[in-house]
Structure formats: C-alpha cells, structure tokens
Amino acid sequence: MSKPDYVEIVEEVFYKYKDKKTEEFKYLGKNVVRWDAIAKITGQPIFTADLLKLVKNPVFVYSVRTKYAHAKVKGVDYSDALKYPGVLAVFTAKDVPGINDVGYVIPDQPLLADRKVRYIGDTVALVVAESLENAREAGELVQVDYEPLKVYLDPLEIIDPETLEEKPHELIHDERGTDILTRYKIRVGDVEKAFKEAAVVVENKYETPFQEHAYIEPEAAIAIPEPDGGVTIYAKTQCPFDTRKAVANVLGLPFNMVRVIAPALGGGFGGAEDVGNEIAAKVALVATRLKRPAALIHTREESIIGHTKRHRTISWYRHAAARDGTLLAVEAKVILDKGAYASLGPFVAWRAVVHSTGPYKVRNAKVDVVAVYTNKIPGGAFRGFGNPQVTFPVERQMDLLAEELGMDPVELRLKNVLRNGDRTVHGQLLDHGVGAEEVIKKAVELSGWYEKRRLYASLTGPVRRGIGIAIFYHGNSIGAEGADYSSASVIIQRDGSIIFRTGLTDMGQGAIQGLINILAEVLGVPPNYIKVEAADTAATPDAGPTVASRSTAMGGNATLVAAYKLRQRLNKLAAELLGCGSPDDVVIEAPKVYCKDDPSHAITWRELVEQAFWKGVPLQEFGFYRAPPAEWDEETGTGAPYFTYTYGAIVSDVEVDLETGVVRVKEATTVYDIGRVINRTGAELHAIGGYIQGMGYALMEDLYYDSEGRLMNNNLSTYHIPTARDVPEKFNVYFVEAGYYHAPFGAKGLGEPSIVAIAPSIANAVVNALRSKQANKLVNKHPLTPDYVYGLIKKAGVKP
Amino acid sequence: MVKVTLTVNNVKYELDVPPLERLIDTLRYRLGFTSVKEGCGRGECGSCIVLVNGNPVHSCLALTSRLDGAEITTLEGLAPAGKMHAIQVAYIEARGVQCGFCTPSFIMVTKALLDRVSDPDDKTIREWHSSVLCRCGSYPYYFEAVKRAAKYLKEGKVYFDEREVREKYHLKVLAR
Amino acid sequence: MVGIELVSIYKPKSLSDALEFLDKNAPDVKPIAGGTELLLLIRDKKIKPPKYLLDLYPLKKQLSYVKVENGIVRIGALTTVYELSQSILHRDKRFAGFVDVYDKFGTMALRFEATIGGNLNAATQYSDYITLMLVFDASVRLESVKGVRELKLSEFVLDKRKTALNPNELVTEVVFREPPLDSSSSFVKFDRREILIAGIVTEATYLHLEGDTIKDVRISFDMVAGRRIPARALKTEEFLRGKSFTSDLLEEAAEKVLPSEMSRVTDWWTTADYRLEMSKVSLKRGLKLAYERVKGVR
C-alpha cells in the first residue's frame, strides 16, 4: 500500500533538511515577533468580553449554582426570580431542546442539573436579565428543593487502595452504577520475580494536588441568534469544533447551524476545553429562545468553581534495581481524584498510565491507574494532562534509588534513560529522534550540577541551598485517544498577501506563529505577508482540538503540506516565466523571485501571483495530515501509544530556610528535545513560562475544601500563583533537536512538556538542600508549602 | 446619579454615573476602552490598572463618581494617533507577549514606573511588576521590556511611527 | 448587589462639612478613603451597602502628610501607603519597620490607593500598619462635631472589624512619639509567595538599646490570643526589658515566654502549631533585625 501524499511530503521535507542547521533557515527557529503582538500591545478588543461593545441590546445570563455538593434536586421554584426587575426568563433542565449533556468524553454531565447535583458548581438554573447585576441578584431568589446526600471528598472513601475495589457507598453516579470512572493498566514482564532478585527496592506513597489554571481572562461567551434559526457564538474555547458539537447536541441542531468563533484567549492551559462548551451552550440556549444576543461573563470566583482542574492523585510506587543501578521493575497504583464528572478524565488517566514508568528502560511493570468520582470540582485537562502526576513520583523514586545505591542522581538516570534503538515499557521501538541522553547532559552542564552538588553539601547555617534534577518524556498529540488529524488552508490574495486559516486556536501559547514560520519558510515569503484568521467553525477547516502539544507537529504538518503543494505549483510557473532549467531551481525570496543561477533576472512575488491568477494556477490550498495510527492493548498496556515523544531535563537550584520551611527557587535550567526549533520565541517563552507555572504547582498551589465540599480558596489572593517577585533570578534554556520524521522539519511539541518535570526537580532540590535520608523519603507530596517543609525538617531532625 | 467630568486619554467626558459604578465599567462599557481588562474585580490580578493622575490604580476598585476632574490614561491613550509609545515598542521587541490579557496593565505600570525612575534596577522592576499577575509566565521578558523602554526614553525616543512598527513586525502592504 | 442603586455619595467641602454630614447621617454612612477594602466588603456581602458613602478624597490635601514636630510623628489618615514611602519614615533607620511593611504590602499598585487610615479602620489581623504602629505605641485622633479625642491604637481596635470609632467620628490622624536615636524597628512577614499574601504570621518590633542593654522594647503580632486582631506581646516585652541583648536571651524569650501569651488558630491555610513556631522565629528575627539596624550593621 502506498503512503498518502501528505505522509510522503512530510517525510521528504524532513529528510531533505535533516542535516541543515536550524540557524541556516530564514524564518524557522528565528525570533519572529508574533502575529498578534501589535493588537495586544495596543489593547485592541480581541477577547470575548471585549466584543460585547460591538453587540447591541444583549441579555445577560447568570448561572445559579447548587449550594450542596451532593444532593437530589426535587424541584426548582423560580417564580420570585421572574418577578425581579429586568428579569426576562429563567431556564432549567426541562428547557433544553436537545440533549441536556455537555460531558466531554462520556455523557455524564448535564448542562443544567436535573435529578442530582454532584459538586458545588453544578448549574441548576439560568437567569436571564437585562443586566448582569440583575441576573445575579435574581439568581438568589431561585428556590431549589434539595435532598442532601452524603458528600464524598476523599476518593479513598470510595475505593480500597489495597485491592482497588470499589467500596459500598451512596453512589455519586447512580445512573452509571459505579463511581469508578475508568481503569487502565500495564502488565509487562515478571514483576514478582524482578522484585525478588533486586538488590535494592524503594517504595513510597505520593500525593499531587489539584491545580487551578488561573488564566487571567475569566470565561466569557456571547451568542447571536441567526435569522435562519441557527446561532453564532463567540466564546472562550480552545476547541471550537468540539464546542460546536456540544452546542449542536444541546440545541438539537445540525452542525452547520451552529457557528463557533474563538477570539483571542487570555490563557487556556487546557482549562478552556470543557467550560468553553458549557458556557457556549448556555448562551446559545438563551439566544435561540429569546432571539436576542446573550452574554455570559464569569467572575473570578465563578471561573474557579466553574471549570475543571488538574486532577489530584494519590499513588503508591515501588521500584526495583540491580546493584549497578539498572532498573528492574516498577510497580505502581495511581488513583485520580476525578471530582464530579468525567470531563477528559479517561484520557488523562490513559496518558498517566502510558507515562507511569518515566523515560526509562523498564522491562517489568505492573501499573494500575484508576479514576474515581468525588463531589469536588471535576478534574479535566491541564497542561501535562496526567503526566506531571506520575512524573512526580517516578522522579522522586529515582532519587530514593540513587541514595540507596550511593549513586549520583544524574548517573542513575543516564544508566536507565531511553536511547535510540530502545523499546519503551509498552514495547514501542524508538528507532530515531530520542534526545533524552543529550538533554540530561546539557542540563547538567548548563546548571553547573557537579560543582553545585559539591558546594552545597558543605553549606551550614539556617539557609541551605540544594540542586535537583528531574527528567521526563511526553507523548505528542492525542495518540490512541482518538483520530489524530489536522488541517489548514492557505489562500494567496491577488496582491500577494496571504490568508491563513486553521481550526487550531491561540489561547496565548503562540503555536500559530510556528505555523506561520513554516508557511513563510516553505513559500519563501516574510511572515508579515501572512494574516491569520481566528478559528471559526464556518470558515476554518477542522484541525482537531488545540490540545496535547499537537499544534506545531500536527498543525505544522498540515500547513507544510498546503505550503508545499502551493510552492510546487508556483515553482513550475516561475520556471516557465523566468526560463529556469527546472522548477527546483526557482528561488523565492519575496518580493524577489528568480532562478538560482541568475538572481539579477527577477520578477516580483506579486507578479508571479498575478500570472498564476490569469493562467488559472490555483492560489489556494488545503493541507491535511493524519498521524500514523497509535496502538494500545488494554489488557497489557503495550503497543505504540504515541507516534513520538518530547524529552526534557530540568535542574532546579533552590534555597531552603530551615527555620521557616520557606523554599525559593534561585536558578532554573530547562533543556528540551523538541526535534527542531520552529518558533524560537514561543519555545523559550514555554521553557520559562512553563517553569514558572510548574513552580507554582510545586510550591504554592492547591485547592482546599471544607467538609461540605465548598472551595475555600476561590480567588487570586487565596489561590496563590507566582508573582513577578517569585521568579527565579536566572534561567538557562537550551533546545536539543533530535528530529522526528513524521513532523514538520522534525519538530515536536513543547506546550505541555514545559510543566511536566518542574515539581519533582524542585522537590529533589529541596531534598538535596536538607541532606537527610529521612527527608528524602518524607518529601512525597507537593505543594512544598512552608508548613509542610518545616514539618518534615523537624521530623527528619535536620539542624541548621 | 453623580455628574463627573473625566479626562480620558486627553478627551473630556461629562458623565452621569451611579455612585457605585466602578471605573473599569465606565472605561470598558461606557467609553469602550477595552484595553482595561477584568480578571478578578478585587485588586488582585492587576489586569485593570490604568493611570489616574499619573498613578497606577486598579480601576476595578475605583469609583467613577469619586474621580471628578481626574486625568485618566489607558493604554489606548499612551501615544497620539498614528504613533506608538516607546514602551509599547519595547514590549513588542522584548517578545514577551503571550496571551496578552495582562499586557496592557504591565505597560501602564511601566509608564508609571519610568515616569518616576528613569533607570530602574531589577529589584525595582520586579517590585512594580508585582502589581500584575501573568499566568503565561512572561515576567522575565517584561522585565527586559522595561529596560529596553528606559533606554529608548533616555535616548529621547518617545514615539515611533505606528505604520513603520506595524510593517516591521506585522502585516505589510506589498509593493507591486 | 441588592440595594446598591440606593447608595448615594457625599463629597464634603471641608473636614467640618464631612463631620457634620457624619453626625447628621450616622450610622447610615460609611467614609471611603482608598476604597480597596470597603468595596470588597460590599461586593462579598460581608457588609450591607450603606445609605451614604462619605467620599474622603476632597479632604486629601488636608489629611495627607507625614510630619515630625516637637518630638511627635503625625501621619494624616489619608496618606497613601505610597506616600508614606516617599516620607521621612522610609529614610530614617528608626522607622525601618515602615519599609518592611511597605515591602510586603499588597502590590505596588495597591500602595497608591490604600491609605493608612483605611488600613487602621479595617481592623483585621491583616492590617499590617496596626501591627507595626502598636510597637510605636501610636494613638489615633478621632474627630467629630463634638470635638477631638485621642485613643491608643490598642484601645481603638476592639475586635475583628470592630473599632472604638463612634459612627459620627472620623479618624483624621495617627500620632506617636518620635523614637530615640539609638532605636529601630522591624516587621516580619512571609508566606508561600513573596507578595500579595496574608502572612503566615506577622510580627513587629521596636527596640531601644543602651549599649547592648535593652532599654525598651515593644513587640506585636497579627494576633496574640483569642481575638483575631493585632496585639502586643506584653509578657515577652517585660521579660526582655532591661536585659542584655544576646542570642540566648532571644531563644529564651521565644521558647519560654512567648508561648505563654500566644495562642494561634488552625484553619485551612495552615496549623496553629506551625503558626506558633513561626511566631517564635519571627520574634527572634524581628528583634535581631532591629538590633542590627540600631547597631548600623543593616
């Protein structure tokens, strides 16, 4: 069977430029100013809520949320709310014309609660009024008759951590008959035997916290009813095509009657997946019913209780190694605290199981990952998507092992890390493009690892320094989660300017710039010829979701395919016009186009475009790419889960105040193998921005609930994220480029990877600062808050 | 209702506002200055910072009714029409812009800082920039932008031609 | 917010006009200074919107100052935190505690809005200027149409969000005696991050030395016992006074004396035990910092 042309194009380009250094390209790997920078630094109305100024006569939608974390809903009386000034309507579950569900992966989440509420955040009714204030006030008059049920906040009340069996309890999802959402496993080799033969075994229990995205733009959505009965929605959503599907389901409309436009997003980090669907469905429901534009704008507090979080996890890990440090086996149990709804939990759990043994050669493994419902804000997508939760225990375990073996943590990792020609724990052959060893070596060099390990070991006094490393790998794109495809369209205009469209969104991460760079490089035009249209289900091709670090690799492939085809046609035409020996001899350095042996005889780019127009050479192209199929055996956890992996090594250098337990990061080194640097600015911003977000996860961020399931820290003074004054003084950033042949010029993703190993690197650095074997074992969860660190300093008997 | 006269970006507005109307709502929804963003409504995120009589102020905590006679500057008014302020150019060149939601406030804080300290050191920049939260983690790039802006201003380069900046970094009208 | 449309705002022409308005309309009136606290209390529904807001901005010229006259430090109630930083209080080592409070106060932008009077009136354990000025033994000046009275800060702050201010009175000034030359002060506050924090504990120190002998000392915390408002650690002060400043002494004060007058609470943020331990550490650090400042080492 022959390969599809798009696969051939991507491979051809990869091999053609494989040995070309990134600095030799014209636009690839350069610090190009992003396409939307000027709109942003001039304060243009580009975010959803800004667009309200363009909308006449809108109504405002307020979500009345439950005050109980777990209860039966016996009735909703909104007669008083209807009488409140300015109130136009109140909608409840019975008003949903289509399917009352916005569950992302499985249909377990009503848009408007019907029989039950399952966490404090579930919407019971929508109040619609002439002003947001009035809608909010009237919301307080909605009377709901609840029958409270037992509230479950700890997954261990629901699952037995020994057997992983479900305990008898009052079901949160009675309709499913179980509160175990999903189970994944790996069964490879003979774990029992390996443990018996091992020279060293280390084991520990670990916990990772919930994390709130805390994007600075709270959610907003505006729906405008269309004359044909359809609806156009502007919403904060990462995935407009998924949002369209959700809205179409709720309204009972075909896809082509629902148009979703994703304007600029003020941050997403995965958080703007489900909630985008939910808010879009709410305003669409109102707009189509009242035939008026409908707007919904969340406050910070509504945002925090209203969108999903990074899952909290509890895990138990056992590692076995030979005396020389060779890893022999990994045994693990990981429980994901799911919160009230599945959201993307099944996929998160799957990514967790795939990465559960780290970027190491592991021949024997027994891993179970279970996602368990609780009455808390649902866990969902968050940059890293299950991988940070397993990388923390794995990388802590490696440091426990290193200590047991008397090895340097770097040496232990180098001994076991995956290299070209190795197989992953799932049996996947990594035949090329594995830069794991190189990232470790580079990080060690840039951070001054060995000198600092020596120096810090001799420090005394109440303030200690420590340095720690953590490494990881991260499967690119969605892998075996689903169909993995992408697309893009390029239209060259009569004046030579270019319109670029893709269904991938920009939530601030800037991946679109990578696509522009690819397009510019291949066509030979400067990036400032190219205009990017916002993702719009009516105008841009479906490029799959903007998730999973897939934009540069998957979107980049689609862009590359479109650009390649256009370039072929233009080369052919230019060769005829200029009399070049072969189309391959055509050089486009817009505005100049010439044959490579005669630069003085040139036409302009605009002339070439004009000629193409009159000669009927199509100036538009549609690029499509479908990833090679992923394989996964549910029984054994083997196969080829992702087509390729990003590798990284992080070194953190911290200061620990032994008297207070306060930890501050002084210097950070991040080295990533991203195949090929396509968008250097974006890559560096991720290497640093991802670190800062990961530092928050490591040191300060967590959600706190009271016993009834109410979130205690629902604003930005109680939910701490790093400020300008918390940023480390120094960053060392480096990219390894071990190209991958199914990606544009070899490029791999960095969006999610940039947070995966930050927390364990910081935890390992703290342990190094404490210089205590007991502390090594006690550092088994984060955030490493001052009280937690202080407590373990005391327990371990570390003295200033 | 309270009658107030505000000068916003050098234009005088006579308004009748409810006593508790927040400055952010006046600016965003009454007058259409959308560079002013609401991220928390509690003076925590700093996305709504504007200059009131030259001071950086959280417009979500300020009441319009109390600001009779005040001079207010938002990002839209940082440079005259057709121009771009050196601070804006510095922010483009420092390459720190990601989602851009907090960026207008960082620029306004930078203006307030550089109006007072022409050559701020790292510690001072961090202190002033702690006024705004950035979840993308662009902070180090924004520190750099302040230094770049300080340099431009010292060299007497306050305003740049907007079209030139646009063409240099953004969309271009192509020569025939 | 229910009822916000009923609120009206009054802009006084002078201080006496403001006091008359207060007198006439109390208790249905709330004075508003920087607004950083009051508007949030209304938004969070922790207080009912008042019938009138008394806008204090018109009094800004009159009530915004820092003066040292005849051995008395006077701070106008409408002085913003930023304005404090531009005053002598940030230039003279005796007042170094002001620099410490400023460094951890809100964020830079909030310091342009928040006023000293507003911070004192908020009367919570997070009112860092209360904690600080307790160690300067400060008093607040309360004015009404009936006249003026001065109250010690410790008598002014009664409980969380509760002060001795009568509804017809306005805080116009905070005053304290200018400390002697061989004295200094400090303030300790830390949390998970550097800024925009409540502080796990906060502590303020005033230290007057004669050679190495502690001639006088005052210490306060965000809370000491029972009520969640800043208060002095009087027993600890008593223990330290007159003794020679040594690290053993600090240790003894922290471990033996302070716990006898300190009681802390556990909440979702952290535990009482940890807060007690950090109270000890803060005490020692605050004293040491003030000591080094007197000696000119810092």
Image (tube, grey):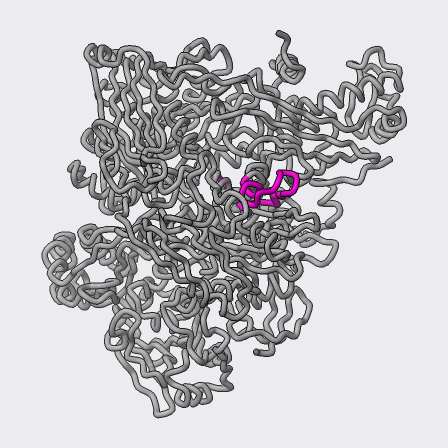
- Residue A265 lies in the magenta stretch: yes
> Residue A612 vs residue C149: left or right?
right
Residue shown at 65% from the left, 16% from the top = A13
> Residue B15 vs residue A431: left or right?
right
> Residue C286 vs residue A40: left or right?
left
Residue A124's place in the image compared with A395, above or below, is below
- Residue A216 lies in the magenta stretch: no
Q: Estimate the x, y position of residue B174 in percent, counting from the top left.
A: 81, 37
Residue shown at 35% from the left, 64% from the top = C98
| Rendered-image quadrant of the C terminus of chain C | bottom left
Residue shown at 46% from the left, 30% from the top = A753
Magenta stretch in the rendered image: A246-269
Q: Quadrant of residue A793?
A: top left
> A274 or C40, which lies in front?
A274
Residue A86's place in the image compared with A669, above or below, is below
Q: Is residue B118 visible?
A: no
> Residue A194 vs residue A361: left or right?
left
